[in-house]
Image (cartoon, grey):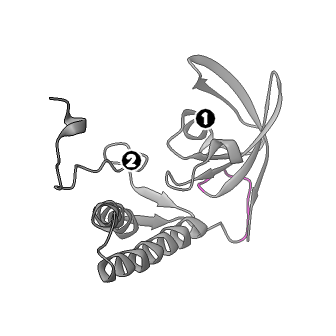
Amino acid sequence: MSRAFVKDDAPGRVLVPARPPLPEHAENLVTPAGLAALEAEEAALRTEMDALLADATGDAPQRLAVVREELAEVEARRACAVVVAPPDPPDDVVRVGATVTLVQDDGPLTVRITGVDEADPLEGRIAFTAPLAAAVLGLRVGDVATAEVGGAPRRVRIDAVTYAP
């Protein structure tokens, strides 16, 4: 008989999407804004968990299972976070937290190098673990780097490095 016709009150396994992975032996580098975002996410999950514990009706038990898993992952990331503060005074060395303008064959590209949980390539934020970021970390304005991007080597020159306060 099809499972569609079998009554099963037991909550099914809930899939929780994994957070972006950290490479083995890599520190969890984050910007101050990234740490604040992790703390805010943790607080929001705790608030949601409290509300779900108070109302165990409907799909609350399944959602509670998801929230517990998400909370455990956020707590683990926050616990191992290493905050990289902007240099004081600012300089032109590329570090986590830098906004970097790169010159390449098809024009300029500006990205902000962040922690893995902060990264959003569509918003111009790339993780320090991304090949392009890894290729330019530690370099200065005027330096040239080659990174494997999309399966092909891409040569870039660092044109500007800035840090938000």
Q: Which of the 4 image quadrants contains residue 108?
A: top right
Residue 147 point in image, percent of width and height: 60, 27
Q: Nearer the viewer, residue 102 or 37?
A: 37
Could you say whether the residue bearing mark 2 is in a helix, strand or loop? loop
Asked if residue 70 is among those painted magenta in the image, a careful observer would answer no
Q: Earlier in the sequence, mark 2 or mark 1?
A: 2
- Of badges 2 and 1, the one in the foreground is 2
On screen, residue 44 versus residue 107, left or right, reads left
**Which residue is the extreme one toward the top?**
152
Q: Is residue 130 visible?
A: yes
Could you say whether the residue bearing mark 1 is in a helix, strand or loop? helix
Q: Nearer the viewer, residue 51 or 102?
A: 51
Q: Residue at x 37, y 42 (%)?
A: 23
Q: Residue at x 16, y 49 (%)?
A: 8
- Residue matched to label 1: 132
Q: Is residue 124 visible?
A: no
On screen, residue 8 versus residue 15, left or right, reads left
Q: In which quadrant will I find the C terminus?
A: bottom right
Residue segment shown in magenta: 89-96
Q: Main secondary structure of the magenta part?
A: loop
Q: Which of the 4 image quadrants contains residue 86?
A: bottom right
What's under tag 1, amino acid-wise? Leu
Q: Nearer the viewer, residue 146 or 28?
A: 28
- Residue matched to label 2: 17
Q: Which of the 4 image quadrants contains residue 148?
A: top right
What's under tag 2, amino acid-wise? Pro
Q: Is residue 90 above or below residue 139?
A: below
On screen, residue 11 versus residue 105, left or right, reads left
- For the image, the number of numbered tags is 2
